[in-house]
Amino acid sequence: MTFEMPDFWLALPEMFVLGMACFILVLDLFLPEERRGISYFLAQITVIGAFVSSLWVAPAGVQTTFDGMFVSDPLGTFLKLAIYVLTAGVFLYSRGYLRDRALYKGEYYVLGLFGMLGMMVIVSASSLLTIYLGLELFSLSLYAMVAFDRDSLRASEAAMKYFVLSALASGTLLYGLSLLYGLTGSLEMSQVAQFAGGHAGEHYAFVFALAFVLVGVAFKFGASPFHMWIPDVYHGAPTSVTLYLGAAPKVAAFAMAMRLLVDTLGPLQASWGPMLVVLAVLSLAVGNVVAIAQTNIKRMLAYSTISHMGFLLLGLLAGTRTGYSAALFYAVVYALMSLAAFGVVILLSRAGFEAERLGDFKGLNERSPWFAFMMLVAMFSMAGVPPTAGFYAKLAVLAAVIDVHQTWLAVVAVFFSLIGAFYYLRVVKLMYFDAPADPEPLTARLDLRVALSANGLLLLGLGIYPGLLMGWCLAALH
Amino acid sequence: MTFELFIFYLFAAVLVFAALRVVTVRNPVHAVLFLVLAFFSSAALWLLLEAEFLALVLVLVYVGAVMVLFLFVVMMLDINVAVLREGFTRYLPVGLLVGLAIVAEMGLVLVRYFVLPPGSAPKPVGPDFSNTRMLGDLLYTHYVYPFEIAAAILLVAIVAAIALTLRRRPGTKHQDPAAQIAVRRRDRVRLVRMDAEKKPE
């Protein structure tokens, strides 16, 4: 038997994160309660180290190692960098929140890092086996994080629902992957793609497998009609975990769609395109219309996630390079918007008080004009008002859809965005034109204030100069 | 039909029957026992595929360890079956309808279009072939990356289970053997000097 030594160098970021996560896990056992900050700082150092090492080891072209199970390419590097930035942001935002609620434990950071590792594995998977394992690693960490506040009945219920539904979706995905293996005799994505392109005869069997794979992917996106878990989980989980769920996993879901639909089943684009049309239109409709009826901000943002995922799928279904890069841009910008919006929710919460109801945003302008403005930017960005990043993201997706002569889809998307604008603007109205129920000025730690301001300004900056990020997105998909 | 094929169909039939009974039987303990039967029959099928090591591991690990633990848990928990079964008959027709539709659709596609790639049928190997050795060779070379990720998944499962269930209750009564061993006489016994008789005042 011949065996080629794998190039471990390419997987340096993964090995570093795994090693550090294990180190923090053990070290945390010996830390007294008041030194818990050390775990936090080590977790941040891990994320920064992964960022640096990913940049360092990134090859110029596409390289695979571990017998074709691991791929390192520009798309993977870009997605990983985005995931690091988002995860670091989540850790930073949630620190004060966790401390106020007796949730400030090392396990939160360990599970967060393992979740990030799972996302990294998904991003650089080039075999059906690794993408599935990455997905499981990432989901398993998330289930535990959702249930982290174990005395809260709502959190346990949310975790249970998430676990059962997600296990079902994983099973469906696994069934689809096993059919692909049965048809092609290979787990390697490039070989499956080659086989699918060359065997038009078994076309229907491939479409059959594709349907199952697509269900799994749509569940991870939370695209309608596989969105049932999103509102309950977003609502039930501690806000710091909702923050985590809403940010980096969207980028990972995009990576999963790119690897499975484009890299593996690219030759079947004519089949999955129409399927994505159904998912996208349903998500836009359900997300935007149902969000209007919500009085809880976390639930409202959950439905808004569903509608944004509809937009993201529009970019994917165009099936062109501009479409993919528009979807990638949308994924990154959406994650930043979600980080900012949930960041303000965390900012408003204090020990023993969750700023969950829309009413809690009343008169925010009088309490803190600057953070009311940051929330305004996040809401305008989600609604797609220029000059925010959300506007440009929507524009790029719509342009890609019109390029492939699906103008009606663009019209539908704009129509539902207009409906959606109502509930984003309602938050703005509450902040600026209503009297505050609780006139106390806001108090927050310096790091949270600085990070939140940077996040809001970034959304504005990316709206005014979208070219830089868009250029990276295009280069990543070269 | 060869004898091998006969054995295959026999164990396959037992497997399907047992799997069906796991979800339909009333008593949870019986359900666990049927699951044991299902594992055992699939182990027999793996033996027919010449995957002897995996078949033995399935019996040893799953039947021997995991299912015994399951049985313990099921017997210790007081599961009220009646509550679990509430609404079963109400949802049964819809479930059956959807299930049958899916099976029919899947059958229509798979029977006509599913073709295995040529040359993919496994060939019988000689008596010298050791698939335990083969597994070891593959697991730690070609599959080393997925193997390590699987290890990380198990670690996360342990961390999650402990983080979610371990509670430190103040004031619980437990023994500390080290402290018990290190105890000295003077920690426990206090000699008090007393006069045998009360002094007259």
Image (cartoon, rainbow, N blue to C red):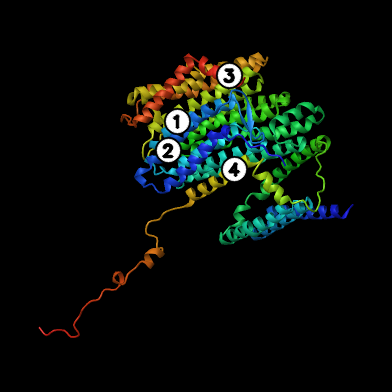
Q: Amino acid at mark 4?
A: Glu
Which residue of the protein is positioned furthest toward the left in this rendering? B201
Q: Are marks 3 and 2 on the same chain?
A: yes
Q: Amino acid at mark 1?
A: Gly
- Residue B13 is situated, as x and y percent measured from the top left of the image, at 79, 53
Q: Give the number of callouts.
A: 4
What secondary structure is marked by label 1? helix
Q: Which residue is mark 3?
A: A475
Q: Amino acid at mark 3?
A: Ala
Tell which tag, 1 or 2, sits nearer the viewer.
Answer: 2
Disc 1: host chain? A
Q: Residues within 10 Å of mark 3 (few under 14, many from 20)?
A: few
Q: Which residue is mark 2?
A: A42
Q: Are marks 2 and 4 in contact (CB under 8 Å)?
A: no
Q: In the image, is residue A209 above or below residue A465?
A: below
Could you tell me which residue is drawn at 85 percent across and 54 percent down?
B4
Q: Is residue A469 visible?
A: yes
Could you tell me which residue is drawn at 80 percent across and 53 percent down?
B127
Q: Residues within 10 Å of mark 4 (few under 14, many from 20)?
A: some
A426 lies left or right of B42: left
Q: For the residues marked 1 and 2, what is the alpha-carbon distance in whole angstroms? A: 14 Å
Q: In the image, is residue B175 above or below residue A205?
A: below
Which residue of the protein is positioned furthest toward the right in this rendering? B1
Q: Which residue is mark 4?
A: B148
Tell which tag, 4 or 1, sits nearer the viewer.
Answer: 4
